Image (spheres, rainbow, N blue to C red):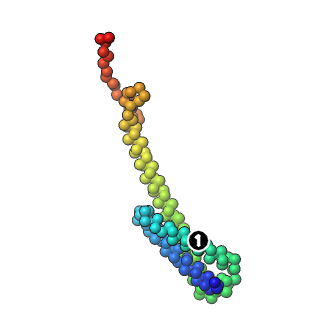
Amino acid sequence: MSTNANVTELLTVTLKLIGVLEREIEMLRAMKPSEIQALQQDKIVLSAAYETQIKALKANPQVIKSLPAEQREELNAAIKTFQSTLMENERTLRAAKETTQRALNAIAEEVQLLTQKHAGYSAQGTAAAGAGQRPSAVSFAVDQRF
């Protein structure tokens, strides 16, 4: 592949990857994580292609130097946009993860409170007390006719 074709391919891959990341950010903000799964295969393929193209350019740095100024600026702008979109994607993923973790913790605490209130019976067959509650009195009668 010619050097110009390598740069064109890198630009194409970078712009597609930016699009995928932006869609993922939108889905996370809209609280539609189930729809993100559809993007994952594209994200994996494009990320691998991006990495391959970047490695090829790093292995042959004179390619960048030989580019016309306009194409070099276009490539730099695309890479900067990709990097900022990637950072925004990471922040959004982290925020979604923290939100999910807080929700799970709140649910777990509620389940624990409900479980404590309705603890069932103890090993001795008496009603188990919930947290902070005193065991209720159990009435029974003994048949003394034996």
Could you tell me the amino acid type at mark 1?
Answer: Ala
**Number of numbered labels in the structure image:** 1
The answer to whether residue 144 is visible is yes
The answer to whether residue 29 is visible is no
List the single residue furthest toward the top. 146
Quadrant housing residue 48:
bottom right
Q: Position of residue 32 (x, y in %)?
A: 41, 63
Q: Quadrant of the C terminus?
A: top left
The residue positioned 43% from the left and 45% from the top of the image is: 109
The residue positioned 44% from the left and 51% from the top of the image is: 104
Mark 1 — residue? 48
Quadrant housing residue 7:
bottom right
Quadrant housing residue 28:
bottom left
Q: Position of residue 69 (x, y in %)?
A: 62, 87
Q: Residues within 10 Å of mark 1 (few under 14, many from 20)?
A: few
In the rendered image, the vertical position of residue 88 relative to residue 79, given as above or below: above
User: Which residue is more in the foreground, 27 or 38?
Assistant: 38
Q: Position of residue 64 (x, y in %)?
A: 66, 82
The residue positioned 67% from the left and 86% from the top of the image is: 66
Q: Quadrant of the N terminus?
A: bottom right
In the rendered image, the vertical position of residue 20 relative to residue 65, given as above or below: above
Residue 67 left/right relative to 106: right
Q: Position of residue 56 (x, y in %)?
A: 66, 77
Q: Tag 1, which secondary structure? A: helix
In the rendered image, the vertical position of residue 19 relative to residue 106, given as above or below: below
The residue positioned 49% from the left and 64% from the top of the image is: 92
Residue 144 left/right relative to 58: left
In the rendered image, the vertical position of residue 144 relative to residue 45, given as above or below: above
